[in-house]
Image (tube, grey):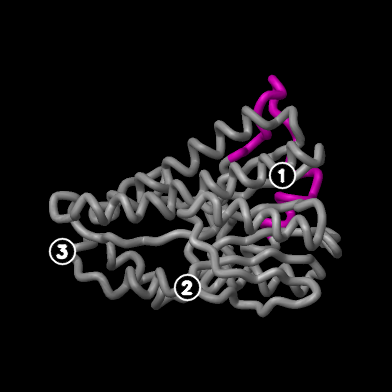
């Protein structure tokens, strides 16, 4: 098991779901954490936790949070852009433009803001770090009813690839991590969708009946191996981009 005792990680969207699960697992492994979300993070502030309410759509708020964590714990080793939303769900023709703008403000610009804050932090300190942007299978495959979500996760993948290329010589490794299906509030929302809004709902109902989910602990263990196990970050042949910038967590049931 990878030793991460004393390392520093930031997790956005850490109030519930996968973000909360990651926070709990990393805390159990002895990491010092900066946790933020629009509501109270899952873990309370303490000697090893900075916990703040932050809207990732607000670039200045993200920058201030990064500075707060660095001021408390020093160099940040790992930054996880996990904050995200699923809605609006439904045919693109029925969705108001403002709904899509609000979605992209979190799912895309929130990732941009977190990435910028972390890159600036690394550049200022001259150290190494790992960026993990939480992606989805929806980045590679379209689903009727998920126009905004699929588009935003595809954008996250490409942003991750670009920053991996830009910062590979400056101490950053960047990954777009697809965690598989985790049974969160977002999954519950999907299962409540009528087929006319989301035709693929039956697939997710079948997954729930089979309990074919990845646990947050499983995702966290895989994430930490990617971040800190040297076998997971060899360079490709041209040395420009970390091998496998897009990573899918294997199914826990396999």
Which quadrant holds residue 198?
bottom left
For the residue labelled by badge 3, is the local secondary structure a helix, a strand or a loop? loop
The earlier-in-sequence mark between 2 and 3 is 2
**73 to the left or right of 249:** right
Nearest the viewer among 248 and 65 is: 65
Q: Do the residues labelled 1 and 3 touch (CB within 8 Å)?
A: no
Which quadrant holds residue 244?
top right
How far from the left and from the top, in percent, is residue 231? 78, 43
Furthest residue toward top: 238
For the residue labelled by badge 1, is the local secondary structure a helix, a strand or a loop? helix
Image quadrant holding the N terminus, namely: bottom right
- Residue labelled with disc 3: 196
- Residue labelled with disc 1: 121
Tell me the residue at 57%/54% (across/down): 62
Compute the Cα span from label 2 to label 3. Answer: 23 Å
Nearest the viewer among 99 and 147 is: 99
Q: Is residue 230 magenta?
A: yes
Compute the Cα span from label 1 to label 3. Answer: 46 Å
- Residue labelled with disc 2: 183
How far from the left and from the top, in percent, is residue 168? 70, 31
Image quadrant holding the C terminus, namely: bottom right
Q: Is residue 106 placed above or below 39 in the rendered structure?
A: above
Tell us which disc is closer to us: 1 or 3: 1
Compute the Cα span from label 2 to label 1. Answer: 33 Å
Binning the other alpha carbons within 10 Å of mark 3 as few (below 14), some (14 to 19) or many (20 upward) gives few
- From which residue to which does the magenta span run? 222-245
The earlier-in-sequence mark between 2 and 1 is 1
């Amino acid at each position: 098991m990878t030793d991460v005792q004393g390392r520093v990680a930031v997790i956005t969207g850490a109030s519930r779901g996968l973000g909360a699960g990651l926070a709990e697992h990393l805390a159990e492994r002895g990491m010092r954490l900066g946790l933020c979300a629009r509501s109270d993070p899952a873990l309370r502030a303490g000697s090893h936790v900075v916990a703040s309410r932050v809207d990732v759509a607000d670039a200045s708020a993200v920058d201030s949070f990064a500075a707060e964590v660095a001021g408390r714990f020093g160099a940040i080793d790992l930054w996880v852009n996990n904050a995200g939303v699923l809605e609006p769900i439904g045919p693109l023709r029925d969705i108001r433009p403002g709904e899509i703008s609000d979605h992209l403000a979190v799912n895309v610009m929130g990732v941009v803001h977190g990435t910028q804050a972390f890159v600036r932090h690394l550049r200022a300190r001259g150290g190494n770090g790992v960026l993990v942007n939480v992606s989805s299978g929806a980045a590679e495959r379209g689903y009727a009813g998920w126009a905004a979500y699929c588009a935003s996760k595809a954008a996250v993948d490409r942003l991750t690839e670009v920053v991996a290329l830009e910062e590979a010589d400056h101490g950053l490794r960047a990954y777009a991590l697809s965690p598989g299906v985790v049974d969160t509030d977002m999954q519950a929302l999907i299962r409540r969708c009528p087929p006319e809004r989301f035709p693929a709902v039956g697939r997710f109902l079948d997954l729930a009946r089979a309990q074919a989910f990845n646990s947050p602990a499983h995702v966290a263990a895989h994430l930490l191996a990617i971040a800190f196990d040297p076998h997971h970050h060899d360079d490709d042949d041209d040395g420009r981009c970390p091998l496998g910038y897009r990573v899918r967590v294997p199914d826990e049931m396999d």
